[in-house]
Amino acid sequence: MPADNHPPCVESLYRAHNSWLRRWLYSRLSNAADAADLAQDTFVRVLQRRLAAPLDQPRAYLQTVARGLVIDLWRHRDIERAWLETLAQLPEEYALSPETSALAMECLVAIDRLLDQLRPEVRQAFLLAQLEGLKCPAIAQRMSVSVATVERYIAKALRHCYAATFESTP
């Protein structure tokens, strides 16, 4: 099969369920453009996963993929809103160019995605150390765990950050 052809099962899945998925997304987002974009993104994800056979419950599968994309959209918008509020509070002499602001926003979203991959307790320990500057004993006390556990959590988070930064493929 040529590389530019869509697998028949994805093509038929798209034809059979795209309109339904867009309506489902619209009911959650109340925005036709966002619903259409996320429906397309859902099918792109399905294509990337290279389904070998038709799905037993295609709508449930599409909902699961789309729900994750909706959550990503909301998180992205929350981060963007917080970033814009932060920028609005800066004195004018520290104002960023639109390009620098956009790059910073991309970095914030990437960091959020990276941290979201960590277990909640690992993320909490890491953020307490990095953002609040707490030492392991203080984190252990706040989290009601041992110092050794906090050290393991932070080491795990640092390994995860290192791997994402230096071991990822382009």
Image (spheres, grey):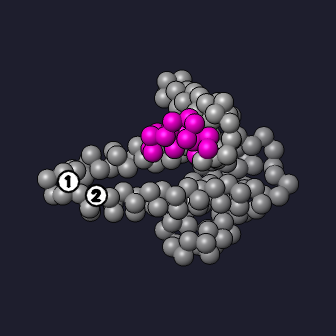
| Residue 138 in sight | yes
What label sits on residue 76 in the rendered view? none
Task: Name which residue lies at 48% across and 29% down.
Answer: 165
Mark number displayed over residue 87: 2
Picture disc at residue 95: 1
Q: Dot 2, crowdedness within 10 Å: few (<14), some or many (≥20)?
A: some
Q: Is residue 113 magenta?
A: no
**What is the magenta range?**
123-141
Q: Amino acid at mark 2?
A: Leu
Q: Is residue 5 visible?
A: no
**Of the pair 78 and 134, the residue shown nearer to us:** 134
Depth order, front residue of 147/64: 147
Q: Quadrant of residue 80?
A: bottom left
Q: Confirm or deny contact between disc 1 and disc 2 (CB under 8 A).
A: yes
Instruction: Determine the main secondary structure of the stretch shown in magenta.
Output: helix
Q: Where's residue 21, x and y in %?
A: 66, 66
For label 1, the crowd category at 10 Å Cα-Cα, with few meaning under 14, some 14 to 19 and many 20 or more, is few
Q: Residue at x 59, y 59 (%)?
A: 71
